[in-house]
């Protein structure tokens, strides 16, 4: 049978996002049982009770579609955005989950009660990093940093099978490392979505890329981008810039090239802090292809100390949008092994 090729125990991963929740099942070796994860709407604005019910429904559906019985599930992993107390299982103030009951919510124990299973709670970027470390791009590495490039910049650091959570559950918030300081007001650094100045996220996220593009358009820079900008939906504009970069538009090429440089600065800072085996780039902008990664590597060679510059692998992530739920399930497995 199909099931005999999988190794028990089985773990459910729940990846909670601002708009949707991804649920899937993996076996003991990290193999997903479903070709496609179960997607359910978060409905955050309706309140945490509704979203918790949606998570539970998604988890049950994933198990059912996998051909398993619920009692064959050993544990559940939950990856979530927002500020949190990881050991306490509390969601404190999730910025992109707004609605009744989200603040100071004991989300881990509430989901555990709904599912009658142990639930392991983790930051979503940490979970994605663990997924890549366990069965993705970092599976041969001992230590790894993952940058997820999207609306913001998420980050996760894994060292010898351990997720660096930090003392206050704020470890590896590397999208908010400061890469430009505020010396004076003549040439101020960019403002980040977090309200602070000069963060990596304010320069290298997709949001920052669009801001920089808009500034160029407003300044009258000659570019083919102008003809298509207004007609293109905001969510597709980063892809438009990248496509024009690939077809030789000088302004779009400069935008993408600068983004690679900023990411190289971020990667170098981490290489000089923890000296990992590997730095991995995932999320939307990782679809930019080999040239973009080549530019990041080229700049790291100039910026980093010779030994880490020569010895650190710089690669793209492999699990795509499944990294979150696979990693969350992996975190549940990790906890079971420790028990």
Image (cartoon, rainbow, N blue to C red):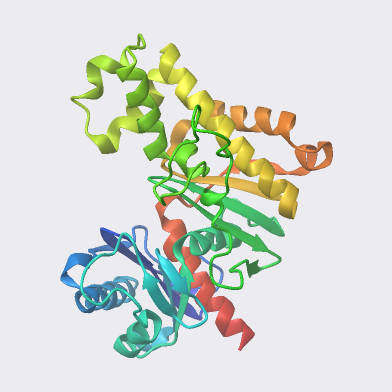
Q: Is residue 283 above or below residue 213?
A: below
Please provide percent x and percent y for residue 251: 42, 15
Query: Quadrant of the rendered structure where residue 47 is?
Result: bottom left
Q: Residue at x 72, y 60 (%)?
A: 142
Residue 313 locus on image (x, y percent): 69, 43
Nearer to the camera, 330 or 102: 102
Instruction: Report the residue at 54% width, 33% height from top.
Output: 184
How many badges with numbers are in the image?
Answer: 0
Front in this rendered view, residue 190 or 82? 190
Residue 1 can be seen in this image: no
Q: Quadrant of the N terminus?
A: bottom left
The C terminus: image quadrant = bottom right
Q: Is residue 61 above or below residue 143?
A: below
The image shows residue 176, relative to residue 68, as above or below, that is above
From the viewer's perspective, tell me whether residue 174 is left or right of residue 149: right
Residue at screen point 16% across, 70% down? 46
Q: Is residue 269 left or right of residue 253?
A: right
Where residue 278 appears, as percent x and y from the top left, is 68, 48
| Residue at the outermost top position | 222
- Residue 258 visible in the current orientation: yes
Q: Nearer the viewer, residue 53 or 98?
A: 98
**Left or right of 144 in this view: 192:** left
Could you tell me residue 6's position as x and y percent?
Answer: 49, 71
* Vertical side of 214 occupied by 24: above or below: below
């Amino acid at each position: 049978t199909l099931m005999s090729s999988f190794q028990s125990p089985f773990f459910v991963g729940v990846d909670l996002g601002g708009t949707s929740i991804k649920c899937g099942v993996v076996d003991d070796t990290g193999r997903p049982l479903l070709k496609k994860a179960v997607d359910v709407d978060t409905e955050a604005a309706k309140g945490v009770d509704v979203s918790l019910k949606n998570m539970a429904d998604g988890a049950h559906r994933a198990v059912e579609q996998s051909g398993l019985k619920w009692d064959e599930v050993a544990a559940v992993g939950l990856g979530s955005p927002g500020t949190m107390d990881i050991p306490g299982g509390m969601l404190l103030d999730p910025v992109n989950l707004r609605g009744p009951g989200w603040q100071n919510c004991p989300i881990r124990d509430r989901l555990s009660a709904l599912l009658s299973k142990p639930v392991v709670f983790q930051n979503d970027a940490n979970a994605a990093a663990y997924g890549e470390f366990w069965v993705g791009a970092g599976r041969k590495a001992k230590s790894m940093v993952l940058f997820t490039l999207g609306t913001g910049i998420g980050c996760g650091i894994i060292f010898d099978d351990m997720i660096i959570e930090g003392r206050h559950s704020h470890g590896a918030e590397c999208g908010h490392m400061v890469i430009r300081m505020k010396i004076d007001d003549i040439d101020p650094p960019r403002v980040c979505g977090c309200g602070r100045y000069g963060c990596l996220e304010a320069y290298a996220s997709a949001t920052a890329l669009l801001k920089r593009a808009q500034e160029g358009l407003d300044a009258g820079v000659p570019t083919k981008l102008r003809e298509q900008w207004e007609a293109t939906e905001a969510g597709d504009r980063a892809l438009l810039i990248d496509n024009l970069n690939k077809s030789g538009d000088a302004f779009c090429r400069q935008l993408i090239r600068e983004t690679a440089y900023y990411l190289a600065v971020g990667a170098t800072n981490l290489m000089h802090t923890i000296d990992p085996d590997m730095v991995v780039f995932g999320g939307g902008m990782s679809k930019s292809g080999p040239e973009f990664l080549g530019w990041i590597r080229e700049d790291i060679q100039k910026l980093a100390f010779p030994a880490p510059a020569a010895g650190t692998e710089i690669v793209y992530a492999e699990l795509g949008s499944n990294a979150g739920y696979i990693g969350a399930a992996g975190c549940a497995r990790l906890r079971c092994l420790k028990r």
